[in-house]
């Protein structure tokens, strides 16, 4: 990688203290359990959407917003989360965000449509607080194990995605007596458990004297835009494929394969997370793995569009695997390059730019498909954006030395 804008050198990395936070097993537990709530409460909405729409008389656009609105709020509230971390610390921000997720997500079922969308927006703001707090705490609790720590909480996030999307109807809804409002409460209130764990099992961290408490990123730094653009490309592959999978299949007469396609694509996220436990120490911060995974994701998505039947579905496996590994590789970069509140600022900005991209690039795909009346063209903006973002990989700073992980 190009080392023109190094922020945190290999020597700095190896000179960092090995661990300032809780013991290793507790760190692993807190990171993983907190990671669950990065996406779990968002992904329980799609399975419940038909019931919610029927009870509250929602249209298609409003029903889709139950999932897309929290993603948009991640972008809107990202810098506010960075500011909060600079004022009260990442630990307190994480605790407050988890508590807010628990109650706002539960409140989605307490009223009418207006209350539903208000609570959904607040839930997205709360998740926006969790996203930069986790990598910031990782630099405080476990600075010598950035790759492993990132893989741990990202595994929690991906497990949360799968739990929310696959267990809501067969498990949680029967437990809630077929009441979608109560099912939301059952999924949401357990977010208080990791909040209590962080409160009781970790101590406030005292920043080093040279930590200036910055919360606003330097927008002139190429690194800010590089990370945001690349995260947006990886997320667009994941969200765009999920959004238009049914459209593409219906367009070529394979609509009956949608269930199998969703399972094949989304379960690869768990495999990607498992592989990163092993590969993270070698891949995180290196340009070649990022380049290869981006290319695999784009080629696999192209294959899904042009190949018929089960052959097209088979390409979803490498596509999903690449998207999952790209996500972990990208999320691990802010704590590699920075420390303290600088990590929060860089991570929050990366997530903000990435979330805006994840919202608008797939939306553009839908507009293209509508205008051309060609469902497969919904994927075209995703492929073009990924191709444009690919060269950005080579401009990233040189990674610190992770040989001791």
Image: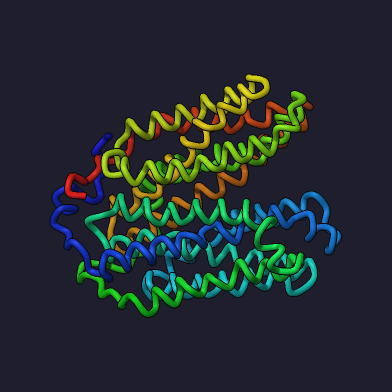
- Is residue 225 something that shows in the picture? yes
Residue occupying the point 50% across, 49% down: 353
The N terminus lies in quadrant: top left
- Is residue 361 something that shows in the picture? no
Residue occupying the point 13% across, 57% down: 15
* Residue 278 location (% of width, % of height): 31, 43
* Residue 197 location (% of width, % of height): 41, 74
Residue occupying the point 29% across, 61% down: 139
| Left or right of residue 115: residue 320 | left
* Residue 172 location (% of width, % of height): 66, 63
398 w.r.t. 314: above or below: below
342 w.r.t. 299: above or below: below
| Left or right of residue 367: residue 149 | left
298 w.r.t. 336: above or below: above
The scheme the figure's colours follow is: rainbow
**What is the residue that sits farthest to the bottom in this orientation?**
200
Q: How many marks?
A: 0
- Give 81 or 260, whichever is nearer the viewer: 260
* Residue 314 location (% of width, % of height): 57, 27
Residue occupying the point 39% across, 62% down: 31
Quarter of the image for residue 367 reads top right
| Left or right of residue 138: residue 167 | right
- Give 307 or 73, whichever is nearer the viewer: 307
- Give 72 or 67, whichever is nearer the viewer: 67
| Left or right of residue 280: residue 129 | right
């Amino acid at each position: 990688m190009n080392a023109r804008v190094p922020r945190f050198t290999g020597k700095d990395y190896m000179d960092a203290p090995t661990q300032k936070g809780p013991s290793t097993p507790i760190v692993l537990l807190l990171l993983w359990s907190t990671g669950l709530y990065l996406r779990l409460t968002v992904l329980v909405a799609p399975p419940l959407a038909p019931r919610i729409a029927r009870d509250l008389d929602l249209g298609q656009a409003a029903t889709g917003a139950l999932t897309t609105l929290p993603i948009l709020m991640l972008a809107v509230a990202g810098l506010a989360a960075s500011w909060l971390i600079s004022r009260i610390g990442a630990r307190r921000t994480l605790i407050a965000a988890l508590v807010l997720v628990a109650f706002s997500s539960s409140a989605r079922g307490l009223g009418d449509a207006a209350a539903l969308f208000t609570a959904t927006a607040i839930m997205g703001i709360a998740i926006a607080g969790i996203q930069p707090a986790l990598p910031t705490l990782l630099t405080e609790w476990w600075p010598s194990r950035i790759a492993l720590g990132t893989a741990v909480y990202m595994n929690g996030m991906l497990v949360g995605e799968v739990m929310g999307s696959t267990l809501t109807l067969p498990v949680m809804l029967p437990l809630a007596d077929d009441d979608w409002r109560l099912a939301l409460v059952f999924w949401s209130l357990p977010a208080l458990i990791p909040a209590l764990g962080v409160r009781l099992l970790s101590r406030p961290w005292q920043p080093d004297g040279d930590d200036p408490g910055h919360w606003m990123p330097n927008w002139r730094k190429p690194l800010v835009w590089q990370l945001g653009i690349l995260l947006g490309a990886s997320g667009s592959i994941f969200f765009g494929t999920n959004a238009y999978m049914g459209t593409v299949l219906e367009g070529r007469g394979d609509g009956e394969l949608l269930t199998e396609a969703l399972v094949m694509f989304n379960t690869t996220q768990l495999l990607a997370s498992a592989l990163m436990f092993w590969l993270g120490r070698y891949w995180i911060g290196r340009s070649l793995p990022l380049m290869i995974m981006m290319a695999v994701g784009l080629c696999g998505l192209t294959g899904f569009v042009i190949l018929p039947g089960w052959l097209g579905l088979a390409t979803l496996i490498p596509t999903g695997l690449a998207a999952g590994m790209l996500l972990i590789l990208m999320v691990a970069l802010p704590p590699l390059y920075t420390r303290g509140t600088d990590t929060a600022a860089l991570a929050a900005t990366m997530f903000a730019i990435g979330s805006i991209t994840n919202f608008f690039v797939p939306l553009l795909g839908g507009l293209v498909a509508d205008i051309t009346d060609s469902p497969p063209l919904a994927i075209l903006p995703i492929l073009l954006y990924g191709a444009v973002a690919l060269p950005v990989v080579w401009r990233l700073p040189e990674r610190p030395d992770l040989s001791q992980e």
